[in-house]
Amino acid sequence: MTAPAGTLRHKAINTIRTLSIDAVQAANSGHPGAPMGAAAMAYVLWTRHLRHNPADPAWPDRDRFVLSAGHASMLLYSLLHLTGYDLPLDEIRNFRQWGSKTPGHPEYGLTPGVETTTGPLGSGVANAVGMAIAERMLAARFNRPGHDIVDHRTYTLVSDGDLMEGIASEACSLAGTLGLGKLTFLYDDNEISIDGSTDLAFQENVGERFAAYGWHVQHVDGDDLEAIDAALCSAQEVDDRPSIIVAATEIGHGSPNKAGSASAHGNPLGEDEVRLTKEVLGWDPDAAFHVPEDVLAEFRVALEQGAARQSAWQERFEAYESAFPAEAAEWRCGVAGDLPEGWDAHLPAFSPDDGAMATRAASGKVLNALAPIIPNLVGGSGDLTPSNNTYLNDSTDFARDAWEGRNLRFGVREHAMGGIVNGMAVHGGLIPYGGTFLAFSDWMRGAIRLGSIMGCHSIYVFTHDSIGVGEDGPTHQPIEQLLALRAIPGLTVLRPADANETAAAWKVALERRNGPTLLALTRQGVPVIAEQERVREGVPRGAYVLDDPSGGSPDIILIATGSEVSLARDAASTLAEQGIAARVVSMPSWELFADQPPSYRDEVLPPAVTARLAIEAGTSIGWERYVGDAGEVAGIDRFGASAPGKIMMERYGFTAEAIAERAAALVARIRVAEPAGG
């Protein structure tokens, strides 16, 4: 039944609604309709079911609430303020304003209680699946009979738009396959999108779709408090399947002229309609941002309940720590995001005697050397495990009722994989990675971008990084992807030159906690660099001098990444025979190099040396920042073709002979343009 008018429950729900419409109206921007329609079910979840502590948003065993429908941000901000999070009413008044903690869409790390950044529809769905996976993984690893220190749920409010997005289909299909019983969706089924009725483009039976995924499905009236409560209780009793509660709601509920229409979705109601709506809701039309004292007291019970729940958990953890001190220490280390002491001593070192080795193969060796030392390192690939070399040999698959596995089988679901990895990262306790081909980074770019916005400790392992892929042809041969990924702020891209650089790149990825890291790895074998110490010191700085026979006064600088570094070294040897001293600079990461002080950058790339040739089997755009006006780029500005990788590299000019010839011509040109003493 709906909350009777005049009751405390009725006032509490309408407080959520009026705070939302007042904030949107004051900002003259936002989405009032969804918070108004979903307020009743949010009230039930937050006051009767959600286990959280507003005084400590980072309590590890809290339930997670994900507002995947991020446009309904004022619903979440209202709940956070009312239940006692550090979000004063002034922040609600400053909704969508510069410097406020109430941005247009929820942002992880900015607002206390916001579990993940949402807005791009469907992304929160995938994040929530990642959180549910993380909970099951950690529970399997740490819980012992009579000692459950990991036991929480993930609740997600999703919209019609979320469920239209492909990423949601990918993630929900996987969640059903895995049987994530502690994942519950509340579907705000209001049948309205920006364009109008969802019938225009979305006529599927969502309940039947999710039943086909293997989910537990219920249907309720989204304004019936007892039905919502019963549905949530029922969902909690289902252990072997995720649950979705399809809640029929009315967008803009209470607005006499806009309820149930697209006009309530993404625009303020307008001052006149706000007054009329408040009258319908039994509210003082002249009161803005009004929170009745009895309503605040009703919501602030969450502080007392949360403190009691966390205290009880702390007692359980202390008993656990007494019984299992080693496991408790591991738990603390993982939750803090720390790495085990001395872990890097287990990084493998490679020798030229090992022979040519693909960096994807070296990456697999590094992963398996570190996996026993870093037990919270987990991940998998998008149905490319043997190609990406992402499998942890000493573990098993994470699967339904086999939660102890550390290997994730994402299936052919690249976009969802990225979102799930991000969700695992923000959940905490794990260092997750996901792998696919570099060309398919386009499929998960949205997730990579969000991981960068959030500063997730996510690791993306992308192999088959150039036309060296060979016979699969232009669809699988990345050309513009490296540049496109380097353009994402906060993302560190590393394209290692050999096995030792790959090990050093993994060290960077594991230690870098303020943003995601991407490894671009070869399919083809490349020679192992013998100068291990130079590599270990140079890779974290983004670029370093690998060879310099000139003693510091080179005629030309060859700047290369990945598999092209070995070509640069061979070309330098050829140039030496012609009396041309070539410095070889390996530049695995633009971002890391840009972070170095100018003195170091000038040491690696002396400004006086204008003869510079950048060598990378990808688009030439962007390299002008390093080669300058006088330099050149040996790159690729057209798509590839289908042929063996060796033939591809030859036809596109990536041979030592071709590089040496081009470098010699460049030196000659610059010598003519800049005669000695001129």
Image (cartoon, rainbow, N blue to C red):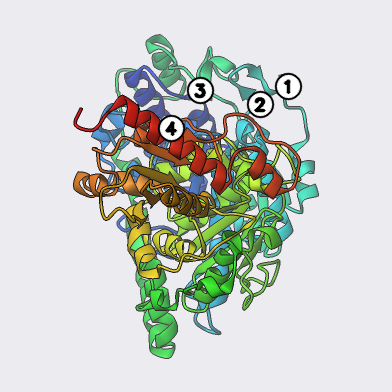
Is residue 220 in view? no
Tell me the amino acid under the disc marked 1.
Asp
Ranked by sequence position, the earlier of labels 3 and 2 is: 2
Q: Residue at x 51, y 77 (%)?
A: 142
Tell me the amino acid under the disc marked 2.
Glu
Q: Which mark is residue 632?
A: 4
Tell me the amino acid under the disc marked 4.
Glu
Image depth: mark 3 or mark 2 in front: 2
Q: Which mark is residue 199?
A: 1
**Which residue lies under the disc numbered 3?**
254
Q: Secondary structure at mark 2?
A: loop
Q: CA distance from mark 3 to mark 2?
A: 16 Å
**Which residue lies under the disc numbered 2?**
191
Residue 397 percent location from the top left of the image? 68, 69
Image depth: mark 3 or mark 4 in front: 4
Residue 348 lies left or right of residue 292; in this view the side is right
